[in-house]
Structure formats: C-alpha cells, structure tokens
Amino acid sequence: MNKTLTVALLLSATLVTGCTTMTPEECQNANWQAIGYQDGKNGSDYSLLQTYVEECKEAGISVDQKEWFVGQKSGLRLYCLPDNGYRVGLAGNHYNGVCANGEFVEQYNLGYKTYQIEKEISEVESELQQINWQLDALDSKEKDKRKQLKEERKRLDMKRIGLMFEKTRLAKPQYGFSFEFY
C-alpha cells in the first residue's frame, strides 16, 4: 500500500470517529480540499479548520485554508439540502449554523423536534417497562405468599380436624368389654 493511500485511510478513520487530531505526517500529506469536502458533508464549521491549523502548526506545517474552504463549500451543498436537514435533526445531531438556506433550518428543526419527542417517548416507555417489571415481581411475590398462606391454612385445618377427632375420642366414655370364660 502506498504512503498516500495509507495517510488517506488514516485520515478517513479519524474523520469518521469525529476525532480531529492529526499527526505531522497527516498534516504534511493532507489533501485539504478533500478534507474540507468531507467536513462540509458532515456540517462542520470553521472552528474545525482552526483545530487543523493549530495541530499542523505544532508540526511546523501550514494548512491550505483556501483549499479547505473550496472543499467545504462543495460538501456543504450536499449537507445543506432540506431533506438532509430533517435527517440531521432526526438523528439528534448538533447543527453548526453553516447553511444559508432557511429550508434546511426549517427541516432540521422539524427533524430535531421529532427526535426530541421520540426520545421522550422512549424514556417514558423505558420507565413504563421498569414499572411493569416491578409490578410483575410484586405479583409473583403475592402469588408465592398466597400459596404459602394457603398451604399454612391447609396444614392448620388438618391439624384442627385431627385435634377435634382426638377431643371427641377423649370426651366419649370408653367402654371396654371383657369376656371371661370359665
């Protein structure tokens, strides 16, 4: 694998994970227009470029900001589509204020409102599930307790019947017959 492809893959992995830390080698071999394009597609604003500038400056390398802006502008054309605004909002992602058209913002707000409602519904459903589990556990304990009480009642009833027979036996005079033959 050649060096440029390796750097491109590392940079792609970095961009996908959202981490903006760049190594000196990545700064040296960066295609700033491609990076700007990817950042634009992700809705990133100027502050991300400033992070690149600071990181690469530490390595003594300057960022081609003009190329980054060209790429970012291109990527923003895709990001700023109204349908994407809805998807970004629905995913609960933060919007960095990079789109000039009001339709994107309108759709983003609609998607974000839907996201918030779905999130609240999910939280309520989760809480309901917890309550249902707790109620089931109580029902199970009550059933066990009722079963234990029923068994204890049965045991006591049997003992009572036995004692009543014993009392009756003891209360009756005992007649004994004896036969003698001479």
Image (spheres, rainbow, N blue to C red):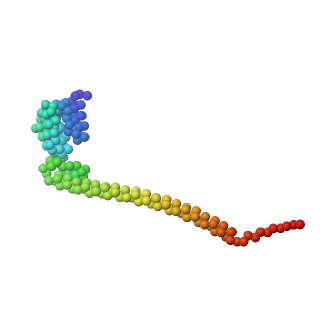
Image quadrant assignment for residue 2: top left
- Which of the 4 quarters of the picture holds residue 118? bottom left
Q: Is 80 displayed left or right of 176 in the figure?
A: left
The residue located at (22%, 35%) in the rendering is 11
In the rendered image, residue 46, in percent from the top left (x then y), is placed at 13, 43
Residue 182: % across, % down: 89, 66
Q: Is residue 117 above or below residue 29?
A: below
**Residue 30 falls in image quadrant:** top left
Q: Residue furthest left?
A: 66
Q: Is residue 74 visible?
A: no
| Residue displayed at 17% across by 53% down | 105
- Closer to the camera in the image, 139 or 108: 139
Q: Nearer the viewer, residue 130 or 32?
A: 130
Q: Residue at x 21, y 56 (%)?
A: 110
Q: How many marks?
A: 0
Q: Nearer the viewer, residue 54 or 151?
A: 151
In x, y percent, where is residue 73? 13, 43
Which residue occupies the extreme right position in the image? 182
